[in-house]
Image (cartoon, rainbow, N blue to C red):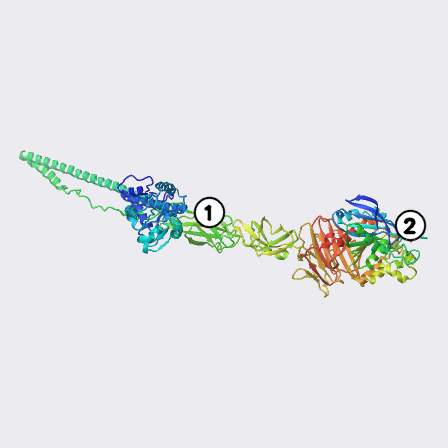
Amino acid sequence: MALKQISSNKCFGGLQKVFEHDSVELSCKMKFAVYLPPKAETGKCPALYWLSGLTCTEQNFILKSGYHQAASEHGLIIIAPDTSPRGCNIKGEDDSWDFGTGAGFYVDATEDPWKTNYRMYSYITEELPQLINANFPVDPQRMSIFGHSMGGHGALICTLKNPGKYKSVSAFAPICNPVLCPWGKKAFSGYLGTDESKWKAYDATHLVKSYPGSQLDILIDQGKDDQFLSDGQLLPDNFIAACTEKKIPVVFRLQEGYDHSYYFIATFITDHIRHHAKYLNA
Amino acid sequence: MEEEMGETPGLGRSAAPKDFHFYHMDLYDSEDRLPIFPEENTRMGREAVQAEMTNEPRGAVKGKTQRDLEEEVDEFVHLYGLEDDHELGDVFIDETMPRIEVSEYPPYVMTGIEPAKEQRDWRLSGEAAKAEDLGFGGWGSAGQCQDLREAYRYAHGRASEEYECYVIPEEEDEEEAADVFCVTCKTPIRTLEKAFDEHKEHEVTPLNKALESAKDEIHKNMFKLEKQIIEMENFASHLEEVFITVEENFGRQEKNFESHYNEILETLTQKYEEKIQALGEKKKEKLEALYGQLVTCGENLDTCKELMETIEEMCHEEKVDFIKDAVAMADRLGKFLKTETDVEISAQPDFEDQTLDFSDVEQLMGSINTIPAPSAPVINPQAPNSATGSSVRVCWSIYSDDTVESYQLSYRPVRDSSPGRDRAEFTMTVKETYCSVTNLVPNTQYEFWVTAQNRAGLSPASECAVYMTAPSPPIIKSKEIRSCEEAALICWESGNLNPVDSYTVELTPAEMPEASGVTESVVGIPTCECLVQLQPWQSYVISVRALNVGGPSARSEPATVHTTGSYFPLNEHTCHPWLTVSEDGLTVVRSARKAPTKEPLPSDTRFSRCVAVMGNLIPVRGRHYWEAEVDECLDYTVGVAFDDVPKQEDLGANRLSWCMRHTFASARHKYEFLHNKTTPDIRITVSPRKIGILLDYENSKLSFFNVDISQHLYTFSCQLRQFVHPCFSLEKPGCLKIHNGISMPKHVTFY
């Protein structure tokens, strides 16, 4: 579990670092980014995990979202892992941008040849938090999660499948109902097989329906001019309807004129970090 | 000591020793005044007066008495010396006194303890030194002691009977010091003596014990004496005052007598001169009359004589001639005789009895004992803060040489209009040069004037002075108090018809009742409202006073202010006619019965389109938080608006309001966050039943929350250059409950 520091840059009084380690869960070398705010020098801080979207690495978020100032002010350690195992030499892993490398979909694959390496769900919810808790000044009791697109889907399912594990959750343009969208169908059939009933275990909209009702406060921002929204990849309405029915608190903000890009994320990242800080620093 | 005693009997000596003090001529010069013996007080006083008058020998006797007393002091000094040095071997001898008695010498014991009294001080030290030099020698024998006592009595004169003295002779016997005290003989003896001498049958106590009890006794007496000294000093200063008063009064009377007697003498002199003059004139007149008569008488005599001569001559004439002449003569004579010869005395030699009129003198004499009528008093202007709402304290003064028995104080209210019947006048008689006039009307001017009066009559009236009663207490509009964590806006009704000068707001933290509650005051408030700065999370009791030149009014009824959260009342002037506000001002109801068909008239203050009401939030920048409790299915709008938001428009339909609107239609909840008719597209999955509203002037933000689940709903960024007020609107029948004056939940502090 040795960590290898790849980079370290001072940013808003804290340090933006990137580490590499050998992942047991994924059986490959994995990189992750971690931001240590100034407050981490003197005490334990809450940990906030960011899950990126399709094709992303740990770099996209730390380079583009501009989250550092808010994280520095609220004293949050923010961890941004990669989006899939890499360099596993699985046939077809690099064939398409929306499956395989860069598209782990935060599930534990059950199908060959993916099931050995593509265990992103376990990596995100188990291995990585243990690694972080062991190596950084974090308070293990205070942990939250958020993400974008496929990462938004990941954040929602991690929260919904583990009531109480995360203090709060939020998402930018999440894939809300993957079993019904082209991306989800492709990924789930690849990683989980053709039995669609198994897919529901990784579908936020379905998970909500059986969520036991631990206190949640979900913030979702969605660009109105997001091409994937109109393509029916994201399907937030289904998720909202399910939450309304189950009285799961969601504030869903359809932001006029914004698309799916990091420009959109950068615009509202501060709102999201404040949302998490409210619960993590309460 | 013995030497001095020896001198003392020498009564005849004329030269007073240097510390020989007469009872001072000036009774009231306290520094040199001798302390007065309580029992002797009156007699001493009398003696003193006598000495003052004429009695030199008595003064000498008096001085002697003092002298003797001084010697007693020395003895006490001696005694104290004994105590201080613990010379246990020293001896008391007192043959005649049944017990040690010192209470009769109060001032002298005192002087021992109060060296501050100079007069005593130097004497004391001098004598004490002398006593030491003597080394207590020759004090042992009873015979010597007896001599001393006699000398003492002799010196004492009349006082000696009351001043029982005792002396403390001492025995200097180093080899065989006395160690027990014979109670029977009252003398210290040696133990050996006890066995053999006359003390054989006597009761004895250890000397130490005897000494202790003697000391106790002395200390007790000293305490009594101390008290007596204080009493006497007080009495003396009282006498001093009386003396001054007597001097003043008699001086005045002397002057009065003098002027009266002078006046009488002058009058008498004048009368004397008048009489003398009148008498002289009368005399002259009489003499002149008599002289005139004398002259006339002489003339007649001459005429008679001439006639006689002529007749005689005629007799010597011839007959014819005689006859001729005789006829003529007879006629002439007849004529002459016909004229009356006045022989009545025209003036009487004695003078007529004249009565002297002394009535005016008598009157003057009678008036010697009366006093002149006083001159007009001078009425003072009103002293600041001397009035209450129903009373004023009027003061005046008189010229010092006027004697006044009473004053008549008159007053009437000052009114600008109608100087007619309602200007009733009131008069009261008082003895002092001040009067508290009560039962007046608050905040009203009265004019006062005063006349002084004594047996001789009434003075002219003083000038009029205008006094003003303090105002009535204001009435706090407790339902209109607004507050936040740093301040409160208090408003009140004047409580007075006429304007007052200013108001004072007094605030006391309620947590600490009277004991430590510091009352802060805000003074000089010109209007009927005041924004006071306060500490957060406290309760304050606030009251208001009105002020005018007469003084402050009583406190108003207090109001309580809590600085927890922001508290605002609803402004009923803005309330749409279809809305009713509950008694506590916190619940807004739109009745379910069919609303009146008639639309309300457009107005600047009252909402006429949206069925809304506005709250009066305190005009303080900072953060304000309140909550609105609603039914999930109710159509409502909550938010803020400027005062001048168009009342005939919906909330959020302009740039002057920001609000959250909920509409419930076909089982769907719709939430809009409206400003200038636009709203972001926001979906909320759980309908709030309690909406938290956070107004943050500093960060120009207005945020809405679902209170029950601490969920942030939306935040407006709004430029708030003026103050805004909370608004509540009900688009359908139902009710909305406002919670204010509550502390801000922690979760809202992140926005």
> Is the same chain shared between marks 2 and 1?
no
Dot 1 crowding, Cα within 10 Å, few <14, some 14–19, many 20+: some
Q: Give coordinates of residue B745: x percent, y percent.
A: 71, 55
Can residue B713 be seen at all in this image of the molecule?
yes
Compare residues A195 and A241 and report the one nearer the observer. Answer: A195
Q: Give coordinates of residue B257: x percent, y percent.
A: 31, 45
Give the residue pinned by disc 1. Answer: B380
Q: Chain of mark 1?
A: B
Dot 2 crowding, Cα within 10 Å, few <14, some 14–19, many 20+: few
Q: Chain of mark 2?
A: A
Compare residues B434 and B13 and report the one nearer the observer. Answer: B13
* B24 sits left or right of B276 in the view: right
* A230 sits left or right of B161 in the view: right
Which quarter of the rendering shows the N terminus of chain B? top left
Can residue B373 be seen at all in this image of the molecule?
no
Give the residue pinned by disc 2. Answer: A87
Q: Give coordinates of residue B466: x percent, y percent.
A: 49, 49
What's the residue type where badge 2 is placed?
Gly
What's the residue type where badge 1 is placed?
Asn
